[in-house]
Amino acid sequence: MQDKIEYGKTVGDVFVENPRMSVRGANVYYADKQAIHDVDLDIAKNQVIAMIGPSGCGKSTFLRCLNRMNDTIDICRVSGEFKLDQDNIYSKEIDVVPLRARVGIVFQKPNPFPKSIYDNVAYGPRIHGLAKNKVELDEIVENSLQKAGLFDEVKDRLHESGTGLSGGQQQRLCIARTIAVGPEVILMDEPCSALDPIATAKIENLIDELRENFTIVIVTHSMQQAARVSQRTAYFHMGHLIEVNDTEKVFTNPEHKLTEDYITGRFG
Amino acid sequence: MIDSTAGKNTNKTLKSFNDILPVEEKTRRLNAQLKKRHRKEMRFQMYGVISLLLGFLFLVVFFNSIISKGYTAFQQTFISLDIEFVEDIVDPKGNRDAKEMLRSDYSKLIKDALKKEFPSVKKRKDRKALNKLISSGAVYKLADLVIESPELIGTTQTLWLASDDEIDLLMKGHIDRNLPESERRVKDNSITWVDELVAQDRVVKRFNHTFFNSGDSREPEQAGIMGAIKGSFYVLLVTILLSFPIGLAAAVYLEEFAPKNRITDVIEVNINNLAAVPSIVYGLLGLAVFINFFGLPRSAAVVGGLVLSLRTLPTIIIASRAAIKAVPPSIRSAALGVGASEMQTVYHHVLPAALPGILTGTIIGMAQALGETAPLLMIGMVAFIVDIPQSAMDPATALPVQIYLWADSPERAFVEKTSAAIMVLLAFLTVMNLFAVYLRKRYERRW
């Protein structure tokens, strides 16, 4: 039945003025299977953009294109233009290592390194050579943990293992680790799906605070979460970007029939 | 009754479960099945216990046989004699030159001491038998003593000298005194002399330093394991220096960097094949390549190490790959996500996490190499070598080969040496395996 649906041009406001990232004509293939079909999207500065859609719709794949995490998958091919500020991130001159210092990522399952809390946060600045000495490094670590809202909880045990924290704390540690390299954009791939409601609320508040300094792209399965934390929402369906609009508009007055069906729970 | 109550709750088109299987019948079948299951579990547990007991029984028999045969090798019989260091024999020229004193006939001193001890022995044939009470190696001890302290010349010293291996066996009870004399290696008159010496407290059994300090010898009482231990040490040193870095590099490359294609598949199959190739084939390869083509010295530990590296490589590669594969992919994503390069990801995160597995595999490979015999026979490490090797280039033998050599020797006294050498080998293996367990426990990470 769904095969008959004509996916036309994306409806809503795809473009914004002065975007942080802009994507034009993105196509992604896993071997012969096309996962993303011709997506155009602008990501505005200091905003949270949520990507929603049914399972397997390509929202995570699209997210992982934004800092080239898909490079690690042998069979994955990406085409199209992905710009961060003025740099085409897939051009030959761009090295993925500094790119990932500019576009950080937080994964679904908290994945701290089996090292101390301090070393977890300090790892990024260390490998990028961001801190000249111990004092600077200490400052970056403390600042990042503060921003991630974790510092007060762990300040007495910075040298204990990061894997000993609770799930929610581990996820905030991962966020602190991402912030510690001073990225412009933070990608979040369902960051709360492994957490309980209280930990989820804490992360959601955190996302709202982080918006001041960072541009955030979040993939989520929870429409309530998208409604709570984001300013813009993009709805993906079968690898197509169906609709992009202000979050309020998407949830109250969706333009596209598919978006409306998904929001009202007819499928997904 | 049951039908009517059940009917209300179920869909009309479907039968209730109770219609298919009434409650009593269901309970009966459940219980029957449960009994069957319990019996099965009991049987399974019993098989486990039986196989454990069998294994334990074999182990006890094995250790009992080796230890009961071999423990006496750690002791040696010494006979005390009053040796007079006659200047005319020790240093006829009187210039105290060490080189010349080394060539003197010290066996004469021992013969004279024995003659003094047993003045009644007159016949030439008996004298010869009497002289055989003392190890032929005792002369070296006298020579060393005199050269070290020349002031002994002209004095008479009471010295403990190692007995001949057959007297040693007699003292340890390995020779049956009740056998008729013609079937016994130690004749009646020798036994009488030894008994006389024992009565004078001139015979003792002491800890056998010789066994741990010297190399191989044709005389069992002078044969030691040190040559083989050092040979094995050099072999293992060469093996680990070669096979650990090469094996680890191969495993890391294959697991983390190599593209998955036909070539890597072929390589993988071949590595697994290599692990199953009989070790004698590696010995032949070593003989052809390292000795004949590259001209490395025969019987040298370095060739043994090269051959055993080939033997150990597949083990290390397979164990390391398994350990690397077991590292959760989320750690790789995490490192890549903060901007680590693939190499940094591997060095900072994957390898530390995989290290316990890699080290365990390596030590198991090393233990295998320590027990490997056949390839060493092919490259000449089976030669009779008296000198303790001082480097990996010297001719050497290895522990398992030494066991093979001694087991093959005709002298009765080598039986206990063989068992003792097996005990030494087992001790090393146990230490290595315990070390592997310790490493695994020490570096294991919990996620």
Image: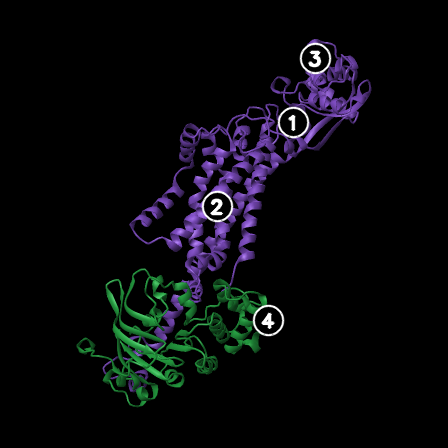
Chain colours: A green, B purple
Q: Sequence order check: which comes first, mark 2 or mark 1?
A: 1
Amino acid type indicated by mark 2: Phe
Q: Relative to A246, does residue B149 appear above or below in the rendering? A: above
Tell me the residue that label 3 is attached to. Answer: B126
Discs 3 and 2 carry the same chain letter: yes
Q: Given the image, what chain letter belongs to the residue carrying mark 3?
A: B
Q: How far apart in space, not on screen, are marks 3 and 4 (Cα)? A: 86 Å
Tell me the residue that label 2 is attached to. Answer: B244
Q: Relative to B390, does residue A48 appear above or below in the rendering? A: below
Q: How far apart in space, not on screen, are marks 2 and 4 (Cα)? A: 37 Å
Discs 1 and 4 carry the same chain letter: no
Mark 2 and mark 4 in contact? Answer it, CB < 8 Å.
no
Amino acid type indicated by mark 4: Arg
Q: Relative to B137, does residue B26 appear above or below in the rendering? A: below
Residue B34 seen in this snapshot: no
Q: Which of the two residues, B321 or A132, is positioned nearer the viewer here?
A: A132
Tell me the residue that label 4 is attached to. Answer: A157
Which-is-in-front pick, marks 1 and 4?
4
Q: Sequence order check: which comes first, mark 3 or mark 1?
A: 3
